Amino acid sequence: IVNLERQFDSWLGNFDSPRISGMQLQEKFDQLVAKFERLPVSSNAGYVSLFDKFVLGGKRLLERNPDIGMPVEQVSAYIANLQERYRDSIPVVQFTAQGELTADSVDEYIERLTAVSVDRDRDLPQVKKIVLATGEGRYLLNWLEVDALNEVRRNNERFDGLLQSNINYRRSQLEKLASLDPVENAYAFGDEVKRQKNEAAFIQVLGTLQQAARLQSTLWGGSTYADQAVAFETQLENWKAKFDHAKSSRTLPVAIVNQELSAIAETVLLDDKYGVGKWKKLIVNADIRPGESTEHKLTDDGLVTIIKNWEEYQVATVEEEAGKLYLYYNTLRKFSRAPRTTPVNRWILAKRHKSGEIEKSLLN
């Protein structure tokens, strides 16, 4: 009895050792039970004490050797399948090629991260049982309990740094525009195409900030991006207000009275190939002046010099689009010398610039 009790105590001393599986403990326990059963039943205090130890040991074995719901021969394949499924499963937030964070990319990230979390909560209890019972799957268990969460945290930190750097760069460019005075820097408010492009950039950065705020509040907490979004939206509204001010201060150019140039301009601009809409007003605002250019181009035949000579003048047109009036500047040219692909000795529309919106009262 004393010798068997010593063996039992040694077995019990290894009970919590991670190097010994539940199945190994069960096997050793069964061997000790077999030895105990060969002892004659006795009321001896040592026998009774050892019997009680075996009863408690058998109950505790359920903790270390739980039912894993599968034959032990299938455990390796089960663990390998889980490891493959979780490989590269932690998602990373994706930007567009333009550096924009969209609602779709945030939705996809949250959806994928939630799916991994659901799978983890489902698989973790079973993997724990397998590790306890067989000793297999320790790496996977550590990944599910620790490494997966650390990977998400590291990804979020990297993303946060990249996002903030990306936003800061683009926002700084737009904040410079928003700080300009519409009177002192009229050039910055006199190009409708640039206005639309810059407004789209403003809206893109604002959208990125708003999506970052949603991601931050949903996953890791805080309001830094939400605060930035509110401040940036105010800047956007101030920038728009400056364009409204520029619109109210914009005037029509001084007209040069020249019926012949007006008639030429009307004929050219009415040509369907230029796609000029009906104008409310046409103003000759710059008289004829000469122009020339010399360009050297390297071709398969050697160095070619291209010389162009022309005369040009400018007309402004007021055109209505979607109920608003816009001022266009149109440069007309007549080439006297040019390559064969360029029309000569007749007036053409060479350049066209959309300046900006004007008040309807200017037509009165």
Image: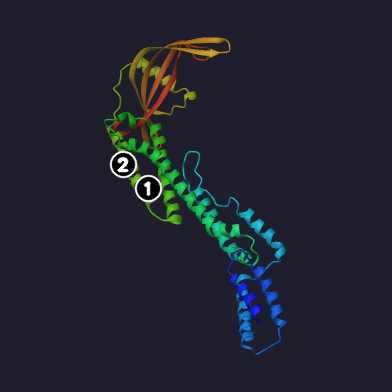
Mark 1, residue position? 229
Hey, which residue is sitting farthest bottom in the picture?
43
The reply to whether the C-beta atoms of the residues labelled 2 and 1 are less than 8 Å apart is no
Relative to 174, say whether 297 is above or below: above
For the point 51% across and 12% down, the residue is 339
Q: What is the three-letter code of the residue carrying label 2? A: Asn
Q: What is the three-letter code of the residue carrying label 1? A: Ala
**Viewport quadrant of the N terminus:** bottom right
The CA distance from mark 2 to mark 1 is 14 Å
| Quarter of the view holding residue 218 | bottom left
Nearest-to-viewer mark from 2 and 1: 1
Question: Which SS class for mark 2?
Answer: helix
Percent across and percent down for residue 241 are: 31, 40
Q: Horizontally, is 302 left or right of 199 in the view? A: right
For the point 58% across and 69% down, the residue is 16
Residue 364 in sight here: no
Percent across and percent down for residue 9 are: 61, 75
Numbered circles on residues, count: 2
- Along the line of sight, the residue nearer the viewer: 364 or 54: 54
Question: Crowdedness of circle 2 by 10 Å Cα count: few (<14), some, many (20+)?
Answer: some
- Along the line of sight, the residue nearer the viewer: 281 or 5: 5
Relative to 278, say whether 290 is above or below: above
Mark 2, residue position? 238
Q: Horizontally, is 119 left or right of 306 in the view? A: right
- Along the line of sight, the residue nearer the viewer: 29 or 69: 29
What sort of colour scheme is used for the picture?
Answer: rainbow
